[in-house]
Image (spheres, rainbow, N blue to C red):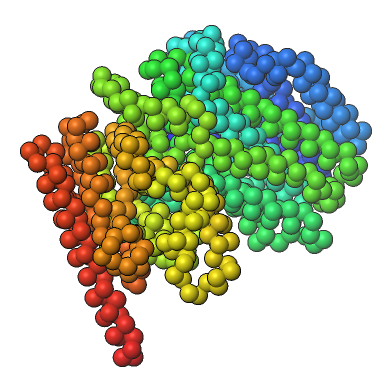
Amino acid sequence: MRRGKPQTPAVRSLMIALCSMYSYIYCLMASNALTRMPIFGGALYMCSQVAIEFFSTCMGPPSRLLPKGIRRFRTVILVFLMILNLVLIVIFPLQLSSFQLWTVSVIVLCMVVRDILGRRLVMASATGRLKDAWFFLFLISVHVLPAFLVGWDYLYNLSPESAWPLLWTYGIADLLVLYTQIRERVDFMDVIHERSTPEQAEELQHSLETVNAFRAYQALAMVTVMAMTITVVTVYTYLLISVQEMMVHMALAVGASFLAREACEMGIRLREKRRATRTDPVYMMLLSLVIWMWGLITFRNLVVSPVRPSTLSIYVSLVLCSGGVALCITCLGYMEEAMVSVARLRVGSNLSGFKMLRMTQLDLALLLGEMISLAALTIMCLRSARTEGQMLGESFRPLLLVPAFLMVLASLICTFRFPISLRILDKLNRLLHYREDGKNNRAMEAQVEQMVISPHHLPFGTSFVKWMIRRVYPHKLKGQENIRMDENNPIVFVCNHGDIYGPVICAAYFPVPMRPWVISHICNDADEFAEYFYKYDLKDIRWIPEFLKHPVAKFVGHLSLWCMGELESIPVYRDSPAELIKTFRKSVEAMQAGDNLLIFPENPNAEYQDHGYENSGLGTLFYGFMMLGTVYYKRTKKNCRFVPMYAHKDTRTLCFGEEIDYIGDTEDDEKERHRVVDALEKEMRRMLSEQDAIAAESRRKKHST
């Protein structure tokens, strides 16, 4: 997954649309200065935006890409919008003089005409019907002429002390709109240069409807964009009608959004540079939604507070909401690029209509978000017949925050349903690269299709358990330089068991993706795992009361059965040699798909050692697991790479030894298998001795002090 700012047209158009919300904020501020009733100007502008968005999305050629329910009830939606507009337009003029009404209406009309003409110029330029020189000339004229009219309106009706600050603020908002329209031209050019038609986009949509990953992303993007729009309108409307010095707070709103966006990008880059690992956008999306929800909770506390909100609380609420929204846009950009790979997996390299499809779907999400916001504004107007902005702010009720809370909560649920992690995406891109080179990897193709096309979910539960273990039981990693990743020949890691300690610590701290070998009855039956866990682990633990051991074993059995499924473990049929071939076949298929393996080959029932796994040492190793090297070489003609490990409980260190290769083309396979196992055991005992010496030195220093 490429790192950097999202470059897909759909996400760029999303950022442009959200930036245009500052025109709405300006209308609030201008209406407050002219009428002391800020909702009037904001509501007029929102009505016009919803109408423009509705006719461009639901009535034009792209409307055939909309869901059937939206197309079927377009007339109902239009009637609903007309009722909202009628309510807003009728309520306010009854409370305003004709002078105030026309003054605000002229300003809003100028901004609406500017937006409509600017969009038409953008489309004309993107389709090649207008040369670049004429485009920029007409676009500047479209912005300059309304600015003169707005300036005349201010200077004629207000004192210079009040008019000039509003005029300068209008200039800043107008420059933002000019910038977004120029960027929007680039987005439309990308879509038009795709040379696609609505029919091609519709055909592509039908092909992708059966892809689970694409459906999950559609739902996630839809509810997230709606939540963004509702949050921006709700939060900024309340803040701008509840505080004084509205110009300062408008600058704060703009600055918070842009700075939050840049801070998010910088934070991701610094984190990846410091840890030398890429950030998974799915988990970053979860973090951003939590920050966003925190901001809404903080904002809700401002609403219910009986005293005027302090400047610090306003800053905190704005930064949290803006930061969450900005980080969500960044994550959506990375996921949007992942959807390009998903579409290529399904339909091949011909993606005609994909950009048009995605832009139409995001436009629909923006329209629905603006409609909900307009409904909230209407409710707020009906609750208060007073004209003072400060009194209107007091009429704001926490109930109006419910749509934003519900949409953010829906985004969280959709994120948990999103099936593509960074690891899966890397494997998907590798498969696409193989296809482009004319190569075939059936094992990888079957695995990727199962994860992308079929219903699949990410192991969020085990990820949380790993995070908790790392917080309460910190460990060190030693010898990571011995891990030489090769996507064409993955690694088989061999580790000590150490009762349950080795598997738990490896699952929590393993630095690269892996799939563990697990005894078959542990993978399939919780009761059998409970019996196994009691026999080899709990039975000899003295500090747990005897009456609690069986209940603990059953609880751990059910928990481990769930974890084994989340970790995509490979069952080992140790007691059934006839079925053991299933283990080797599935392991080789996993390695062909690019998966590393993790094996715990100690024999807990060896005659010349204590019964059970060694708690603080290394038991006798099975030799049978080395058949994997033979089977892997026969299938792929590649030498299997083994990396020995040791998990040391006293020093809390996970050690990685030097790589040992199984040479598959030797004459004596059995002798080669014994050589590799002996070398692995020797390296594991070397790491054990080193860590024992460190632990002894640490105890000596502790006693001496």
In the rendered image, residue 439, in percent from the top left (x then y), is placed at 25, 22
Q: Tell me the quarter of the image containing the N terminus.
A: top left
Task: Give the residue displayed 89% in from the left and 33% down from the top.
Answer: 91
Front one among 173 and 567:
567
**Is residue 18 visible to the viewer in this orientation of the structure?**
no
Q: Is residue 108 above or below residue 476?
A: above
Q: Quadrant location of the C terminus?
A: bottom left
Outermost residue, bottom side: 704
Q: Residue at x 70, y 44 (%)?
A: 405
Closest to the observer: 6 or 244? 6
The relative height of residue 378 versus residue 399 in the rendered view (above or below) is above
Left or right: where 378 falls relative to 421: right
- Which residue: 11% across, 47% down? 671
Q: Position of residue 307 (x, y in %)?
A: 80, 62
Foreground residue, 382 or 448?
448
Residue farthest to the front, as pictured: 607
Identify the residue at the far left of this view.
Answer: 667
Total numbered labels placed on residues in the image: 0
Residue 598, horizontal then vertical, whole percent:
32, 49
Can you tell which quarter of the image residue 17 is in?
A: top right
Q: Determine which quarter of the picture holds residue 5.
A: top left
Whether residue 63 is visible here, answered yes or no, is yes
Q: Residue at x 50, y 75 (%)?
A: 543
Residue 204's spot in the image, x, y percent? Answer: 50, 15
Q: Is residue 81 left or right of residue 513?
A: right
